[in-house]
Image (tube, helix red, strand yellow):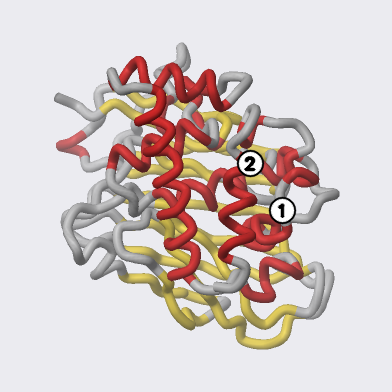
Amino acid sequence: MEDVADLYGELLRLRRGRGIERPDLGAYLGPVLQALCGVTPADRDARVRPRAAAVLEGLAAALPPDLREAARVAFALDKDYRFRTLEDRMRTLAGRWKYSERTTRRLMDRAVRMMVKEAEAAGPAGPEAAAGPGWRVISLAALFRLDTATPELYEMRRIVTTRDVDRITVRLGLPPAPGPDAGDGLVVDALFGARVAKVEHAPRRNHFRIILDLPRVVPAGEPHEFWLRVILPAGQPTWPHYAIVPLNPCDSGTVRVRFAPDRLPAAVWPLDEVPYLDLADETPGAERIRPDGAGDVVRHFTGLREGYGYGVAWTPAP
């Protein structure tokens, strides 16, 4: 990856102050981070922040646990450390770890250096980030099955192109899997509307890039539909939630989760406009959803905002 030294400086600058919680984030990011995130200085914070968070989380995912936590705190990715200054975040983490502030700062610096190495190993951001994806989602219907041998995900997207497009990329987030072969065995198939060109995955990362070839060049302004099926390998952990997190505004979304009838959860509740960074920490709300006779729960959403999660969460049965 080119501009490695620039990326290191941009990351050090970004973690100052409020980190990714600062206002006018798009204008504050340097050119290398803008390219990695696929944003411009003029983009709104609601678009920039989830993209920046996803990039930082991805770069930190392969780090050892202590360095990963140091990185998350440094950039204010952890909602419990969204303090006004880096020094406040560092001081709080040092107190929790019972380390000196100097040692904690050294771990944060090491985390940034390792994140730069991860970015270098991943290669250049490529023209897609600079030009934008060239399409946006009109509607997304998802089915997450937990009643199969291993979990399966079906996602049907209806998109509209903003320029002539013959290849698109979608992303899938999963918890890190243990072992050196994490991610091996993931099966991705396009049931219609596209062909899977390749699936990119760095070992131990929790994000996958699924690159799809469309059957033809889709002209700007034309709608197109495609349907993906993803089969998770045995041993792949899953979160106790499934949510759509659009990176652009989305008109409508439907999330359906099918539980095994003999493994129904203790509680199910909706996730409606939950900030991306808070999804994993979301606690049960007052509303409950009861699975139907087939073990299904379903929620419909309209006017989905970029950077927010929409779906369902559950507490597994004891």
Which residue in the rendered view is the most extreme toward the top?
286
Horizontal side of 53 relative to 316 (left or right) equals right
Horizontal side of 19 relative to 297 (left or right) equals right
What kind of residue is marked 2? Leu
Q: What's the residue at 44%, 79% (across, down)? A: 198
Query: Residue tagged by mark 1?
Result: 30
What kind of residue is marked 1? Gly
Indicate whether 177 appears above or below 93: below
Asked whether the residues under the numbered discs 1 and 2 touch, taking CB atoms below 8 Å apart as contact, a structural biologist would say yes
* Position of residue 79 measured from the top left corner of the image (x, y, whole percent): 50, 25
Q: What's the residue at 50%, 82% (across, down)? A: 195
**Tag shown at residue 14:** 2
The C terminus: image quadrant: top left
* Position of residue 268 measured from the top left corner of the image (x, y, whole percent): 36, 26
Query: 190 and 103: which one is in front?
Result: 103
**Tag shown at residue 288:** none
Q: What's the residue at 30%, 50% (across, down)? A: 176
**From mark 1 to mark 2, how far is it between C-alphas?**
9 Å
